[in-house]
Image: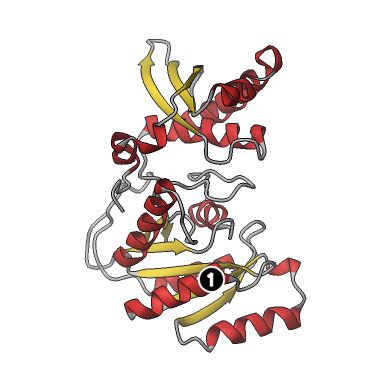
Amino acid sequence: MAGKDTRCGVVALAGPPNAGKSTLLNRLVGSKVSIVTHKVQTTRAQIRGIGLDGDCQIVFVDTPGIFAPRRRLERAMVDAAWAGVGDADVSVVLVDAARGADGDVDRIVKGQSAAGRQAVLALNKVDLVRREVLLAQADRLNQTGVFSDIFMISALDGDGVKDLQAHLTSRMPNGPWLYPEDQIADLPLRMLAAEVTREKAFLNLHDELPYALTVETEAWQDFKDGSVRIDQTLTVARDSQKGIVLGKGGQTIKRIRSQAQVDLEADLQRSVHLFIRVKVRSNWAEDPEQYRRWGLRFDV
């Protein structure tokens, strides 16, 4: 949509790992476009969800969590997060109120201050915190001078999110929409399918493989009856990890495949035939091509 009466802008969702950014993105867009798990750092690259509010289109960017990185992949993810913040019209810093303003939050505050940029603060999971504790957190963070506005929300159940969205809408510049009205995400279908399977793998493997796996969609075949065959490779770093992914009698990978297939059929609105091959590649996290596919910088 174009015209003098339309507005469009970019909002970056930033914050420490597991602050609830992906949950908030899905809530703001009104549909699931980013994977949500109990694990930290499940968002590896910038995921864009597109929300509409009247004549305004907002491109929400779910960035990887910002923390003190140690490995190459972690450094690339944090680099992508700061890049997303720098490119946005408005950035929202999400803080888990139940966890409080820890070292990662302080790191984000210092980064915003050094860049001379103000952000909107969203204190999340406020239903889990006593009011006096919540107000003390808000006061402490407000005194940093980094935040122009503060909202108290629960991304999971939606409390306070409409007020946050209305504020963000009011700050979007005039301009034509960047995406069609019915598009909710800027993510290729092959990557979307891989993210769905990666989410199910993370949920089923619990704490055994936090960083040691990746999923790629290798082939996509559409059939005349409307169904689709999707072939994927789930890569781990060691033989012992392959055994964990497969599970006894192949039960774990079967469960991952079944759950991913159900979600993909719902997302794609068509019958899906999903095939997953598990392979071992010890150095996959040091492959520059892998980073390029994710839109991450390799040498950070």
- The amino acid beneath tag 1 is Val
Task: Give how far across and how far down residue 49 sits, in percent.
Answer: 42, 50
The residue at the far left in this view is: 3
Q: Is residue 110 above or below residue 2?
A: below
Q: Is residue 199 visible?
A: yes
Name the residue located 39 percent from the left edge and 64 percent from the top edge: 11
Name the residue located 47 percent from the left edge and 76 percent from the top edge: 109
Residue at image mark 1: 105
Which quadrant holds residue 248?
A: top right
Q: Is residue 92 above or below residue 209?
A: below
Q: Is residue 184 visible?
A: no
Which quadrant holds residue 228?
A: top left
Q: Is residue 201 left or right of residue 81?
A: right
Name the residue located 37 percent from the left edge and 16 percent from the top edge: 222
Residue neighbourhood size for the residue with mark 1, other residues' Cα within 10 Å, grouped as few (<14), some (14–19), many (≥20): many
Name the residue located 53 percent from the left edge and 57 percent from the top edge: 21
Q: Is residue 124 above or below residue 30?
A: below
Task: Give how far across and how far down residue 225 sits, in percent.
Answer: 42, 11
Q: Secondary structure at mark 1?
A: helix
Task: Give how far across and how far down residue 221 sits, in percent.
Answer: 37, 15
Instruction: Locate the C terminus and report the quarter of the image it occupies.
Output: bottom left
